[in-house]
Image (cartoon, helix red, strand yellow):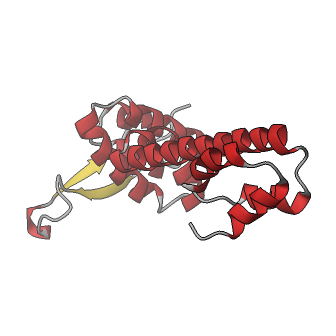
Amino acid sequence: MPCSLHFQVWWCKRALEPPHTQSPVRCQGPTGSALNDPALLPLAPLAGAIQAEILLQRVAQRVQELHEEERQEVSGYTQILAGLKFEKALIQQVFREGIMRESGIYQDILEEGRQEGRQEGRQEGERSLILRQLIRRLGEMPEPMSSRLATLSLEQPETLGEALLEFETIADLEAWFESPE
């Protein structure tokens, strides 16, 4: 059963317009009307719906369907007004799933995380290769030496990889760790 919007709001196309240029809009009618009109979408979460959280999810889904230019603006207004009725965590959860993924800042953060992950993966691979080469050349590594290998800096695995070709004993590896680079 559709719920009605029973409230009067002041609507302005831009939030920074002076109050005397704003025109009142009376929003009454089924919630479905608000879901079909992008200008009314920000108001829909304020409806006295029995299943308000489901309505909020429907609004977020509808916002997601808007053109990119409209989506960011309508999403912002909707989240601000939804904050009058819903907990911040719920709003973030409902809107984060789709809208944030399209944000340029979100994409930058995501790419940075991917790059860091790739770098860490390469470093771990290099350390693993060095450890296997050392074990093959010198035999099992004592635990303190394995721990030191796990803490190598970015450049050290490459340097150690070249130096280990000349190692004959664990003492050579210990000397490499003690030598200044």
- Above or below residue 42? Residue 3 is above
Q: Which of 152 and 70 is in front in this view?
A: 152
Which of the 4 image quadrants contains residue 35? top left
Q: Is residue 5 left or right of residue 157?
A: left
- Position of the N terminus, as image quadrant, is top right
Residue appearing at x 60%, y 45% in the figure? 162
Residue appearing at x 26%, y 42% in the figure? 39
In the rendered image, residue 57, in percent from the top left (x then y), is placed at 53, 39
Q: Nearer the viewer, residue 52 or 100?
A: 100
Which of the 4 image quadrants contains residue 31? top left
In the rendered image, residue 108, in percent from the top left (x then y), is placed at 39, 47
Residue appearing at x 38%, y 39% in the figure? 102
In the rendered image, residue 170, in percent from the top left (x then y), is placed at 83, 55
Residue 164 appears in the rendering: yes
Q: In this view, does 147 lie to the left or right of 121?
A: right
Residue appearing at x 90%, y 58% in the figure? 143
